[in-house]
Image (cartoon, coloured by chain):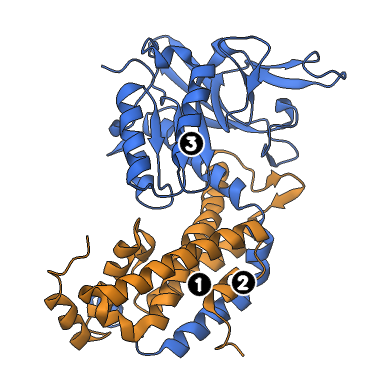
Amino acid sequence: MIKKKENKLTTTKTISPFKDIKLFKKEITDFLNKYKSTVGKHANRISDYFEMSCYNFIVKFYENNDYDISVQNLKSKKYYYKCSPAGLQSNYSFFKVSKKTGIKTYEFEIQHNLAAQSSFNKDIFTNPDITVIKTGSAKTSTTYYEINRRFSYVENKDVITFFEVKNFNPYPELVFNFIGIVNELKKEILANKSPSKKPLHLAPCLMVSGKPNRQTQRIKDSLEERYCINIIYDLFDSGVSIFSKRRQSELKTTGKIK
Amino acid sequence: MIKDTPIINILTYNLPYKLANQIYNENESRFSEVKYLIDHYDLYKPLSKYIETVKILLAMTIFQKRVIANLDAAIKFHGKIKRYSNVSTIKIGSYDFTEKEKNKLYGLIINFNTLINKFGIPIGLNDYEQTKDFLNKVLSLLEHPENDQEKGEQANNNKNDLPF
């Protein structure tokens, strides 16, 4: 019975796109006509979906490292995804990761678009796309804006690591700008004096969807050699495998470069 | 009517301007390279007869990377939330990404994969950095016995004439 099935699979004939181009184009057109409303409806959210994909990889890293995972702050049986820096953090959902080592349980939150305090000046903030913070450390201030509007942020000491997500092809300025954010939030990394956080966390990452050219690849190699950071390109193709259990050791975790 | 419309226009129809523009520009720039490589290097000469197919394959890979892969990412994130909670709706701004919406996207992905399988296109065809890498993959596809054996052999003989 199984053998018959296998035979059926191996004998499936394909149509050559080189021989029947009219049929090839017609099939693509039919596919797009069938799904044009679905594609059109979701196309406006493509960048959000890419950010979701990166968030997924980060959760996967914690899964691979035996953290317990849970989803927090669900409202009306919905996961409220924070897709911009605006809005109060308490109104949005997030993943919580925890790990027990010995008698101590460490708990962290993976937050979307949360303002993080600078390591130089308490009054300035930047918004990494994804931030891992100590649990319950997201705060609200009413003095940030001139009007009496609430502002969500996390103090610099509570930021464990962060991730910048870019859905386009890498270019030199983009990669160097990331070093500016690292300097603002984790200046100790640039001096190679960053303490390693236990349990295991990824070092700050720049996650880019596009493939690098030679120049941006050289920049990545050079920066990763100097600083404890990860620059990950090509997240829709070969870049994905870096988050697999087999290859995750290639990613840097928080701490110093040896 | 259909045959006169460039494939890139068909693929970007109904997409937001910014996304459509990114896809269109990448396609234009890469297709210029494709034409140059095919015209100037013997290795790629076998593809000159099939320039229309190469054009469609190129546009498809760009669409796959910039649209299909992102839609697939939304499905995976939905799956992750469902795995760790009893919730099946993601609220993105004012939009509810429900189980039903996820299933529609899932149907789209399955149909897209069926389409590329039907024409024997390998899933990894869109995994290229430089345009010559894409052309090498298209050459391999052409070499496949079900496509054009004669041209495939010709391509094999020209392998020493690598452009880079």
Residue matched to label 2: A35
Q: Residue drawn 31% across and 70% down?
A: B37
Q: Is residue A139 above or below residue A237?
A: above
Vertical placement of B4 versus A145: above or below?
below
Picture quarter containing residue A114?
top right
Residue A31 position within the rendered picture, expressed as x and y whole percent measured from the top left: 55, 77
Residue under numbered circle 3: A173
Q: Is residue A144 above or below residue B148?
A: above
Instruction: Name the subunit of mark 2.
Output: A
Estimate the x, y position of residue A243 in percent, counting from the top left. 37, 39
Q: Which residue is mark 1?
A: B111
Q: Colour of chain B?
A: orange
Q: Position of residue A65 (x, y in %)?
A: 37, 29
Q: Which chain is blue?
A: A
Residue flagged by tag 3: what amino acid is it? Glu
Tag 1 near tag 2, CB within 8 Å:
yes
Tag 2 and tag 3, C-beta contact below 8 Å: no
The mark closer to the camera, 1 or 2, is 2
